[in-house]
Image (cartoon, helix red, strand yellow):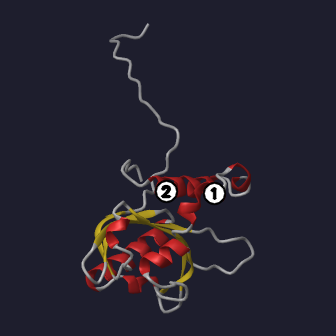
Amino acid sequence: MIDRSIHPNTRILLDAWRRMQTDPQSHGLTGPDARDHENLLDRIFVVEQREDQSWLVRTSGTTLNALIGRNLVNNNYLDLWTGPDRAMMAAFIEAIRFDGAPGVVRGRGETLTGERVELEITLMPLSIEAGRSPRLRMLGLYQTLGGEPMLLGQPVFRHRISMLVPPDTRRLGPQLRLVANLQQGLH
């Protein structure tokens, strides 16, 4: 994901996710301190895939719950989406799960009275801890892109997808360069 227009909170979380994937043991010692990003933490949620292919919200931050107008814990994350958006979100989550890398959703949230806010939702697969049963969990960040006061305190009722930024699974490694010698003769 090279998009430079992502929200700073999204960038912080993506960078932390990458560090955890590179060195899970030392991340807690060298990574950012949660107290430095309180406005980010209140927008985080965790979803877990169930046997019926639903994505149960396991935890959700207080700002996220306030924006949605209810506590999301023990609700299906896919229920935030309707119609084709729900199908796209289900397929998008499957792509993230399959590729094992984060993805970003751009969209908008609407209130019952028609007020709108632009959204950026990031989903990142969580690693399975050694010795534990494999659970398909993802860390999410529900970030508004300004305009939150325009909601006038009303909860977001409807979610619409504008753009999906799929997981970037390129592996960056040593770059090889081919050098050719165009001299005619060998001596």
Q: CA distance from mark 2 to mark 1?
A: 17 Å
- Above or below, 40 relative to 48: above
Residue 106 in view, yes or no: no
- Horizontal placement of 76 versus 157: left or right? right
Please identify the residue farthest to the left as the structure is shown: 114
- For residue 20, the mark is 1
Residue under the point 63% across and 57% down = 20
Callout in the foreground (2, 1): 2
Mark with earlier residue (2, 1)? 2
Residue 160 in view, yes or no: yes
- Horizontal placement of 80 versus 131: left or right? left
| Residue bearing the label numbered 2 | 9
Type of amino acid at the residue the image marks with label 1: Met
Identify which residue, 89 or 153, lies in the foreground: 153
Q: Position of residue 186 (x, y in %)?
A: 41, 11
Mark 1: give few (<14), some (14-19) or many (20+) Cα within 10 Å.
Answer: some
Q: Position of residue 75 (x, y in %)?
A: 49, 88
Secondary structure of the residue carrying tag 1 is: helix
Please identify the residue farthest to the front as the structure is shown: 152
Which quadrant of the figure contains the C terminus? top left
Q: Position of residue 9 (x, y in %)?
A: 49, 56
Residue under the point 39% across and 54% down = 6
- Above or below, 106 relative to 170: below
Type of amino acid at the residue the image marks with label 2: Asn
- Above or below, 151 relative to 81: above
- Horizontal placement of 61 versus 93: left or right? right
